[in-house]
Image (cartoon, rainbow, N blue to C red):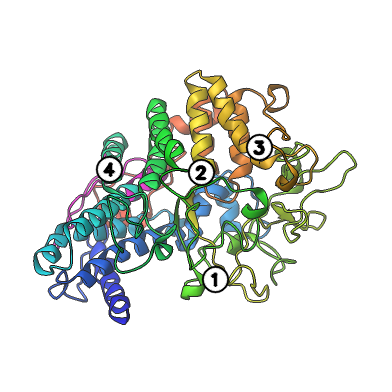
Amino acid sequence: MKKIILLSLIFLTVIADSCKKTLDVTSSRVVSETNYWNTLEDARAGIMGVYGLTRAALADDNGHWIYGDVRMGNFVSPIRQDLKAVIANNLNANYPVINELSNWRRFYAVVNAANVFLERIGEVKAKDPRYTTNNMTVDVAQVRFLRAFAYFYMVRIWGDVPLILTSRDGTFENRPRTDQNAVLTFVQSEMEAAALDLPYYFSNNDLQQPGLYYNQTRNRWSGALITKLGAYAILGHVAAWQGKYVDVIRYTNIVLTNYNTKDDLSYTNTSTLDAAGGFFYTNPTGNNDNQLVSFGFIWDFQDASFTGNIESLTLASPVVNKNVPDIYVPKDSILSIFNEAGDARFNIDTTGTVHSDALSASTPGYFTNFLGKYPIFAKIRVIMGGVSGDPSFRIFGSPVLLTRLEDVTLLRAEAYAVLGEDDLAITDLNTIRQERYNVDQQGLTNASATDYVAYNPTADGSVIEGIFKERQKEFMGEGHHFYDRVRYEKIKQNNPDFIKLINQGGIYWPISRDLIAQNPLLVQNGYWK
C-alpha cells in the first residue's frame, strides 16, 4: 500500500509537470517516466492520478460551486468582492480567484494525464502478467470517460477549447481553439464507447469486471469510480446541453430502467439528504452508490479539506465558528423559491411556523438560522467525519457530486416536456415531488404513496417551469444552477436579455489573460474582449 501511495504521488508530480507544456508553458521535466509503466501498481497509480487531477480541477478555488451555483444564481455574498463580481457576471474583474477560474490549465492536466495513460498502459500489459486484459479494458474505459468529461466541463465554461488527444511528450505546441460542436461530438462518442466497457459494479463479480478490482472489495470502490450507469447519467447532461433531447431520453432510460436491478441505487429521502451523516457523507466502508458520479473527500482516509467543498463557502455560525458566510441565500429568495407548504426541504405553514432547521433531526431542511441576519445553507455540512464533526474545527468532507438518481429523473422529465410528452414528464416530476412534499408536514416517514403534493399547473406553471423550479430546489448547492438556467432560457425563449447573453457568448467565461499571453493562437471569447 505504501508503494502505491508513493507511486501515485510521483505520478501526479510527473503528469502535473507534463501538462504545463501543452497550452501553457514550456515543459521542464522533474521526474523521468522511464521507470514507470512496468507493473500493475504503476497502472493503479496512473488511473488514480487521473481521478485525483479531475477532483482537483473541480475543487480548486471552489470552482465547481462558483461556476455552477454562485454565478448569476440564488446566492449572494455579504463581504467577498470577488464573489459579488461573479454573481453579477462581471468576469473581467481583476481578482485572483476570477483569474484562476478563467484558466483551464488544471483541466488540461486531466487531459494530459489521460493521454499519457492511454499511450503507455499497453506497456504494463506487455510486462506484467498480473495485469489482465479485463483490467486494462476497464481502466481504459474509465480514463477515456474522464478525459471526455474534462472536455465537456470545459465546453460548458469556455465554449470552444483546443482538442488535444495526444500527450505530445517532450514538445511544446500552441494550439488554437476547436469548435465546441466538434468537441462535444468527440465527448459523446468517447463516453458512449467507455460506457459499453464499464461495469455496473466494481469488485462484485460483474460480468464486465469479475473478481476484486486492484485487490480491494466493493465497499472501497462504492461511489468512488465511474460505473456504467454513472457514465450514462453524464451522457444525459451532454445531450441536454446540445439540445439533443431524444438522446437524453435514450441515456436516462438506461439508468432509470436498470438502477434497481443492476445497481444498488435508490431515491434519497429528505431526512437523509440533508443529514450531517447522510447522503453527502462519504462512508469509507461503502454504501455510497447513490452518489452516482462524485469525487469524495473522505475524512477517514485523511482526505477532508478546509476548502474545495461547498461548506467552506456556506457555513457560518451557529453551525461552525465563523461569523459571516461567504455566500448565503437571502430570506426573500428562500421564501420565493420554497413557496409550497409541505416541502420538507423548507416551508412556512399557514400559522407562519418555519419548518426548517438543518440541525434538528425532527424538522430536517436546507436552512438553519433563518431568523438570524444570515440564513445558513446547511443542507450540506459534512464536518470532519460527519456524524461527530467538531464545529470549531472547519475541515469538511462532502464530495464534489455531479449527478444522482433525482437528477437523472428530472433530466428525463425535461426531455419529455421539450418533446411534448407532458404526461410522462409529469410522472417523472411527481416521482421526485413524492420524496419531498408531504401534506401533513411531518416528513416522509409518515407519508403514504399518495400523501404528497403533486405537480399543479396553477401553482407551478407549465410543465417545463415546474421541472426547472424543482431542479432549483432539489440541487441547490450542488453546482447545477447556472447550466440549468442556460438550458431553461434556451427552451423558453422568453427572456430577451438572457437570450442576448447566450447569443453573444456571455454565458462563457473569459479565457485567462495569462493563457492568451502564452499562446498567440488563442482568441478571447468575443463577449469579454
User: Helix or strand or loop: what does disc 2 sit on?
Assistant: helix
The mark found on residue 306 in the picture is 1
Give the residue type at disc 2: Leu
Separation of disc 4 and disc 2 at Cα?
20 Å
Between 29 and 391, the one nearer to me in the picture: 391
Above or below 123: residue 71 = above
Measuring from the top left, give residue 312's x and y in whole percent: 59, 64
Counting every numbered tag in the picture gives 4
Give the residue type at disc 1: Phe
Is residue 92 visible to us here? Answer: no
Separation of disc 2 and disc 1 at Cα?
28 Å
Which class describes the residues within 10 Å of circle 2: few (<14), some (14-19), or many (20+)?
many
Q: Earlier in the sequence, mark 1 or mark 4?
A: 4
Q: Residue at x 31, y 66 (%)?
A: 49
The residue at which mark 2 appears reads as 405
User: Helix or strand or loop: what does disc 4 sit on?
Assistant: helix
Residue range (magenta) = 150-178
Is residue 437 visible to us here? Answer: yes
Separation of disc 3 and disc 2 at Cα?
14 Å
Q: Earlier in the sequence, mark 2 or mark 1?
A: 1
Give the residue type at disc 3: Gln
The residue at which mark 3 appears reads as 434
Q: Earlier in the sequence, mark 3 or mark 2?
A: 2
Above or below 329: residue 399 = below
The mark found on residue 411 in the picture is none
